[in-house]
Image (cartoon, rainbow, N blue to C red):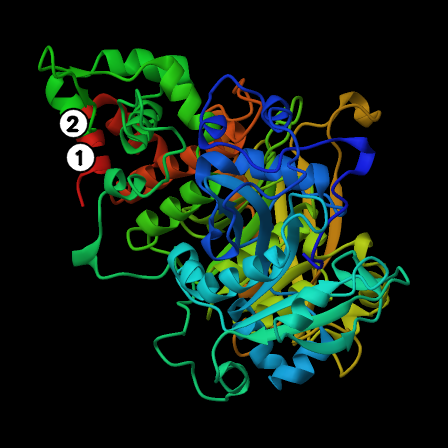
Amino acid sequence: MRCTRARTFRRGRHFPLAFPRWMCDVPGMSIRKRMDSCPVHREAPAGFSLSEVEVRLARSEERPLWDALMDEHHYLGFRRLAGRGLRYVATFGGRWLGLAAWQNGAFKCAPRDRWTGWKPEQQFRRLEMVANNTRFLVLSEPGVFPNLASRFLAGMTRRLSGDWLEAHGHGVLLAETFCDPEVFAGTMYKAAGWEGLGETKGFARANGRYTDPHGKPKEIFVTALRPDARALLSSPLPLPPDVAPPADPALAPRDPEAMRSLHAELAAVPDFRRAQGRKHTVASVLTVHVLAELANMKGCLAAAQFAQSLSQEELEAVGAWLNPRTGRREPVSKSTLHRVVQSVDPEALEDVLGRWSRPRLPIARALAADGKRIRGANRNGDGHHETVALVDHESGAPFALLNFDDDGGELAATHDLLGRCDIGGRVITLDALHTTRKTAKLITDRADYVFVVKGNASETFDILDSIDWERDAAGSFAEDLDKVHGRLEQRSISVLTPPGGLVNYPGVRQIARVTRYREPLKKGPDDAGKGEKDYTETVYLITSLDAGAASPEELLRLNRGHWAVENLNHRQRDCVYGEDACLTRTGNGPANRASLNNIALAVVFANRREAESLAETRRRLQLDRREALDALTRP
């Protein structure tokens, strides 16, 4: 956050200063009831000592309450952490005194970029070394706990880099924050020695760019988390090993000898449940769910019935609970399956997909990115209702997945996913929604792109549409007329290298026109307008690949290969695993179902034999339970 205190009594509500641990653990207690359970403390409790205030990360079971409090009482509200982030609490005697959130550094901030001295090509690569204090909330009236905000801030900055390393695979070098001078003076940051860099220009983000003036510039404060932070951020040399982040901690290639089984990877998913009464581990529950999906048993009820059919040997392999009284393994129940799928952290399952599948699935040069809405997932409550996936063109294997809600939309989520993943040296294909200069800049720092240009990029579309392609094209290619799906189809492409400044996109080296012709073999009666007609469609492409890296034939293949994300991922998840038909609509359920479906799909791809179709692989794993179990439990 940008302040030392928040509007703690807006809407006239009295809210609790702190919450006993048991309030975060009671399954039947609603968030609102927990928020209303304790009165505000007007005075500091007896024996209060500022030195005994503990600063720690919020536990997984405390996150719903943390989110609700921050949204209720912070003047900016709160929906969720976008990208990588951390939630902190300040406590005394087990009671909450304050909340704070840290997220990825701001993508664009001219005063900060001048202060660091990094070059534009360094900015994106080292932006993940910056953490932004986006929320700061003291849960009391002003003056009840003197200097608490400073104590809280100091405790967080001391441990921020280490916590970020443990949570996200790398440390951070710089902390930043933005303070609204109309609301707060930033006294806490000044007292802590943070350096003021001036003000922002007062623009909000619109359509992926900061072009919407709101007239409320913010003050910028930064502090280095180690003495040489500024030099490291602007150095032309690679970062030293003790601070250099991997390209993608979740998806980085690993030594095959060190690869773990899917069941072992699922053991890293945090357990949100309290220890009392817990029987089955999260890894055991999720392994049974994936195994049931491979057996074509969809949903929690079907997975529970499937678990009842497992033998003692099979239950032992998935880590089922051993009843000490009977000495036998017991299958997981439907209620436990439902509760785990509904509540585990979606980001943890996304990481599991990357860690397990990346070293096992052959990923080719080209990746397709596209979003998919989970039908009906937003009927009740909040949560992640959409997913964006990176899929290999040739095999259709899932490369990475990100679940997101409506905040920021598919465009922002795709930027986040591309920022997380190691896409170096690859070609990313995207549909017309993503044809923006920001997306092009994001990709050209590490990879190449092929964008489709349609009416949403009207300026560029008009330029490409005005070209005399028959006269000016430097190269062309046409496929043979092909008979498919009861019609004749043919695709052709014309390509040219644009003169400087014609197409104002970062890194663009070629532009192209693609013409798709379709002629039905059976037309309507007497061609009177009934039935399918001859159809010609024209779309345009821009790409950062030059003529030496991609011929006209290769560009046409890349354009057509983008449909792998629809045919081999989205369609498989809907038609095979029943994702849209699933009745799970609330909480993290829809997002976790999407991740589990992708994990099951990755298992199928990883066990696919040469010249075997996906359907044949699925049937083989469905009929041979022992082989399916080995696929989940062997390294």
6 over 171 or under it: above or below? above
Q: State the SS at label 2.
A: helix
Which amino acid type corresponds to the residue marked 1 in the rendered image? Asp
User: Is the residue marked by circle 2 packed among few (<14), some (14-19), or many (20+) residues within 10 Å?
Assistant: few
Tell me, for residue 188, which label it has, or none.
Answer: none
Nearer to me, 280 or 88: 88
- Left or right of residue 527, residue 373 in this image: left
**Label 1: few (<14), some (14–19) or many (≥20) C-alpha neighbours in 10 Å:** few
Which corner quadrant holds the N terminus? Answer: bottom right
Which residue is identified by label 2? Answer: 626
Q: Which residue is at 11% across, 11% downward?
A: 325
- Residue at image location 37% in from the left, 14% down from the top: 334
Residue 492's place in the image compared with 333, above or below, is below
Q: Residue furthest front?
A: 46
Of residues 179 and 143, which is closer to you in this image?
Answer: 143
In the picture, measured across the screen, residue 509 lies left or right of residue 254, that is right
* Disc ID at residue 630: 1
The spot of residue 627 in percent (x, y) is: 18, 31
Residue at image location 67% in from the left, 27% down from the top: 522
- In space, the residues marked 1 and 2 are separated at their CA atoms by 6 Å
Q: Is residue 547 visible?
A: no
- The amino acid type of the residue labelled 2 equals Arg
Q: Secondary structure at mark 1?
A: helix
Q: Please tell me which residue is depicted at 84% across the width and 24% down the height of the picture.
A: 528
Q: Is residue 3 left or right of residue 120?
A: right
Q: Nearer the viewer, residue 147 or 90?
A: 147
Is 228 left or right of 139, judged from the image as shown? left
Labels 1 and 2 touching (C-beta < 8 A): yes
Q: Foreground: 431 or 533? A: 431
x and y, in percent, of residue 512 in the image: 69, 66
